[in-house]
Amino acid sequence: MAQTVKVTILGTEYPLRSNDEALTKRLAEEVDGQLQEFQSKLPGQSTTTLAVLTALNFAEQEAHGKENERREIDRTAHELETLSEILEQALEEKS
């Protein structure tokens, strides 16, 4: 059941509805940390610019994660196909 979770990002408190309080807080901490990092590297930039850079950074991380997951699935599928062929050959030789 959704509950209200209060998180603070760049000094502003946000009440958010969440089914997983721990996850919401952890993600908010990651967002806040990334925003603070960009803020320290790019002083004078607007909060909007920092938020866009942060969003793009997280989107890039997500894209890389999905690509790595796809590669792992492809590798596993190839290994299973190879094992299946070996098993079929072994069964044919036994027959």
Image (spheres, grey):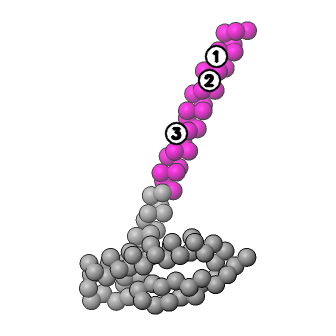
Q: Are marks 2 and 1 in contact (CB under 8 Å)?
A: yes
Residue plotted at (41% across, 86% down): 10
Under circle 2, the secondary element is helix
Q: Looking at the rendering, which quadrant does residue 74 occupy?
A: top right
Amino acid at pointer 1:
Gln
Disc 2: which residue: 85
Disc 1: which residue: 89
Would residue 56 be found to the left or right of residue 23 on screen? Answer: left
Q: Residues within 10 Å of mark 3 (few under 14, many from 20)?
A: few
One can see residue 73 in this view: yes
Residue plotted at (70% across, 9% down): 94
Residue plotted at (50% across, 89% down): 13
Under circle 1, the secondary element is helix
Would residue 88 be found to the left or right of residue 28 on screen? Answer: right
Q: Main secondary structure of the magenta part?
A: helix
Q: CA distance from mark 2 to mark 3?
A: 15 Å
Q: Looking at the rendering, which quadrant does residue 53 occupy?
A: bottom left
Disc 3: which residue: 75
Q: CA distance from mark 2 to mark 1?
A: 6 Å
In this picture, which residue range is highlighted in magenta? 66-95
